[in-house]
Each structure stands twice: as C-alpha cells, then as structure tokens.
Amino acid sequence: MVRYKQLTSAAFISALALLLLNDFYLKATFGNWFTGKLSDFAGLFIFPMFWAILFPKQSKAIYIITAITFVVWKSIYSQWFIDGFNDVMPFALERTVDMGDCIALFILPISYYYLNRKEVYTLSINPAYIIPIAAFAFVATSQTKGFVINDAYSFNYSIDSLRSSLSKEFHQDTSEIQVAPKSTYLKVDNFKSCAHGYMVTCTIWGNSTKSNIAINSILYNCDPTNKEYSDKELKADFSAIVTAKLGGKKY
C-alpha cells in the first residue's frame, strides 16, 4: 500500500475536495470565470496523479496523454465524440470550448513533482475509500443534467438565413450548426443560476423560403436544489430567444 500513499496525501485530498465543492456548489452559486478555471486546475492536479499511482510504470505517458487530451477536449475537435456519446448514453457530457482553459496545463509539472516526492504529509484514510470518490469526481465534473422538450418553431425565411441568425445569436461558427437529419447543439451562455449557461439539442430543416427548429432537449448544469425552477425557466428563456429575437412562431 506504500505506493498508494499519495492518494491520502494532504495535497491530493485537498484538491479532490476542492474539485467536488466547486462542481457541486461554487459553480452553481457563483458561476464565474474563477469557478470555471478552478475545476480545471484542481482536476488536472489530481487526474494524472490518480492514474499514475495506479499504473506507476506509465506515469510519464499518463501525464503527456493527459495534456494532449485536455487540449483536444477543450477544442471543437472533440465535438464528434461528445455528440456520439450523448446519442447513445442515458446521461450527457458537456464542455465549454475555450482554449484559454489550457492555462491550467501549468499545474501538470507541479502535480508530477508532487507525485514523485518521497516525503508527503498523509491523512489517516484508507486509500480504498479515495479511489471511488476520485473516480466519481472525474465523471461528475463533465456530466450535465437535462430534460426532454417537444417544442417546434417555424420561420418565414430560408434555412441559410436561420443558420446565420443562430450563429450570431449563440456565438457559434455556422459550420457547427448542423441541418437535419443530424441534430445540432446551441450553447446559451450565462443564464442566471447556471454555471455555464445551458445547451439545447435540436433539429433544423427548411428550404429557400421557410425554416424550422424542433427542440429535442435542454442540457444544463444549474443549482441541483432547484430543478423545477431550472426546467421551467430554461424552457421559457430559450423560447423567448427564438420568438422575440429570431422571429420564430411556435406550432
């Protein structure tokens, strides 16, 4: 059990506790730039350390793979994986595309240094208790909640104009807004109690004169103690955007 001592070190336990506190309370309560970066720093400190402790011979490779994977995850190039995962799994993943989050990669050398320290202050906790908690934290930090919605809106302008309007309203590249039969994701930023706003899955179709949106679901990371508020308010918020700002008519 000697090689598992880092799992019970004060630094690992503190970073793990900070990650859970931030993802389940601070983000929902404050939801700002700091809370967003806090998860990245705490997560990148303990994630590679966790796996390097379990597989010590591959520790260097684990840290390198973690850095590369984090960069890809924060870029648009991971969207195909997220879309495929969310299509088949009973829960959804979400992440905010922001290459500025890569500043958190500076914590990796510190984590690697701490991993290889011979003397660390440890707590009197069985490492067997830490492993499932850490595994849960890694999954929960990227998991979001959501609900199914069956609303549809029509527009008296072309599908190309609709895509252009959606691109401007939601600050997305036009190429990211897929047309039926594929589903598309629209990211709504900074909605009240939601740490990173919310995402809407929808289907878009039309022709040169008419266009439509069918809303499939809304995914969010809001205050978990106020689910009813989130469901109703998020639905109303998106409906207001589509009707008042984009000129859609519900049918």
Image: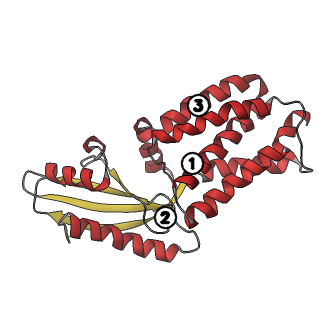
Q: Three-letter amino acid code at disc 3?
A: Ala
Asked if the residue under mark 2 is in contact with the one under mark 1, i.e. CB atoms within 8 Å, the reply is: no
Q: Please tell me whether mark 2 sits on a helix, a strand or a loop.
A: loop
Circle 1 is placed at which residue position? 37
Image coordinates for residue 168, horizontal then vertical, percent:
25, 52
Relative to 65, does residue 83 appear above or below in the rendering? below
Q: Quadrant of residue 75?
A: top left
Circle 3 is placed at which residue position? 67
Asked if the residue under mark 2 is in contact with the one under mark 3, i.e. CB atoms within 8 Å, the reply is: no
Q: Earlier in the sequence, mark 3 or mark 1?
A: 1
Tell me if mark 2 has few (under 14), some (14-19) or many (20+) residues whose alpha carbon lies within 10 angstroms of its own.
Answer: many
Pick out the residue farthest to the left. Answer: 209
Q: Please tell me whether mark 3 sits on a helix, a strand or a loop.
A: helix
Q: Three-letter amino acid code at disc 1?
A: Lys
Q: Earlier in the sequence, mark 1 or mark 2?
A: 1
Q: CA distance from mark 3 to mark 2?
A: 28 Å
Circle 2 is placed at which residue position? 194
Q: Is residue 222 in view from this perspective? A: yes
Residue beneath the point at 57% across and 48% down = 37
Q: Earlier in the sequence, mark 3 or mark 2?
A: 3
Residue beneath the point at 27% across and 61% down = 214
Image coordinates for residue 175, horizontal then vertical, percent:
27, 41
Relative to 192, does residue 204 appear above or below in the rendering? above
Residue beneath the point at 31% across and 57% down = 202
Q: Nearer the viewer, mark 1 or mark 2?
A: 1
Q: Three-letter amino acid code at disc 2?
A: Cys
Lateral position of residue 182 relative to residue 49, left or right = left
Foreground pick, 64 / 204: 64
Q: Please tell me whether mark 1 sits on a helix, a strand or a loop.
A: helix
Relative to 177, does residue 102 appear above or below in the rendering? above
